[in-house]
Image (cartoon, rainbow, N blue to C red):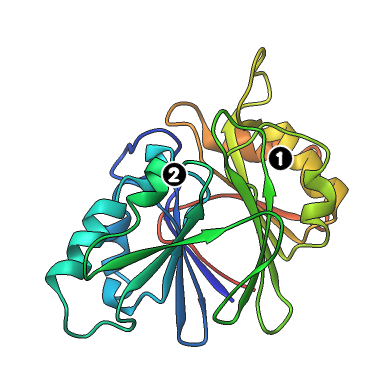
Amino acid sequence: MKVKVLGFYGGYPSNGIGTSSYLIQSGDFNLLLDCGSNALNELQETIDPLELNAVILSHYHHDHTADVGVLQYYWQLNPEGRKEPLLPIYGNTEDPINFATLNWPNATVGKPYSDLQPLEIGPFRIEFMRTHHPVPAFAMRITDENGKVLVFTADTSYFDQLIPFSKNADLLITDTNFFADKKGLKWHMTSEESGQLAKEAHVKKLLLSHLPQKGDLDQLIVEAKLQVDSNCQVDCAMQNQVIIL
């Protein structure tokens, strides 16, 4: 499994970098996980978007879906060379209005997923867990044909059920929108909470993502490292970063 970061900010793009989007590859299968702002531009630096096999969305907040519409136009306007006749876009059906927009004539088709059963997409088995967020949002545990595991928390505040869901992951990508000193109501995790989750779940590598636009990101790493075991690698997401599991 290979994971490439296409965008890593939460909320809005900044410093020429977009919001949450990741290209996940295994063999010749290309899965786009979330499709935030500037995702299409970044994707074209790696593959032709027509080479996508599928897209999956953790939820429908704009910083995770901003480029879905332009991706649909790209497929509509380029009928030749598609890897799939219609690009499947997987999303939850608890927001039926947004789910309906995943269908675009002669381009894309909306496909449902549920936290009640795993989903098989190409070489990937994907399990889902509802997170703590103001809208229906789902963490994903993605296992490839070689048994490598990526866990993506999606947007969420910390809760204990994330620990067994993330257990022994080769890579844990956490929603880390806040520094450790964040107080009050939180719909995203702090650096400290991301580190605690990585420690309790015994993950091999922690990637902090959905990052704030302001502040020293190296401080996020320092704060998370104070919580993890010494054998767990900790990094902040970087543009065009590639991780091979």
Q: Amino acid at mark 1?
A: Ser
Residue 7 image label: none
Q: Residue at x 68, y 25 (%)?
A: 180
> Could you say whether the residue bearing mark 2 is in a helix, strand or loop?
helix
Q: Quadrant of residue 208?
A: top right
Query: What x and y, as percent, mark residue 231?
Result: 82, 58
In terms of sequence position, does the residue under pointer 1 or pointer 2 come before the other?
2
> Could you say whether the residue bearing mark 1 is in a helix, strand or loop?
helix
Q: Residues within 10 Å of mark 2 (few under 14, many from 20)?
A: few
Q: Is residue 140 left or right of residue 197?
A: left
Q: Is residue 142 visible?
A: yes
Q: Is label 1 or label 2 in front?
A: 2
Return the residue nearer the eye: 46 or 107. Answer: 107
Q: Residue at x 45, y 36 (%)?
A: 10
Instruction: Please state, as top left, top right, bottom left or bottom right, where the C terminus lies in the image.
Output: bottom right
- Indicate whether 98 appears above or below 2: above
Is the residue under label 2 in contact with that under label 1 (CB below 8 Å)?
no
State how far apart marks 1 and 2 are (Cα): 31 Å
Query: What x and y, as percent, mark residue 177?
Result: 56, 32
Q: Residue furthest top?
A: 184
Q: Amino acid at mark 2?
A: Pro
Q: Residue at x 35, y 65 (%)?
A: 109
Q: Is residue 229 visible?
A: no
Query: What x and y, as percent, mark residue 11?
Result: 41, 33
Q: Residue at x 26, y 82 (%)?
A: 82
Q: Is residue 174 left or right of residue 28?
A: right
Query: What x and y, as percent, mark residue 13?
Result: 33, 38
- Residue matched to label 2: 96
Instruction: Please state, as top left, top right, bottom left or bottom right, where the N terminus lies in the image.
Output: bottom right
- Residue matched to label 1: 194
Q: Is residue 187 left or right of residue 241?
A: right
Q: Residues within 10 Å of mark 1 (few under 14, many from 20)?
A: many
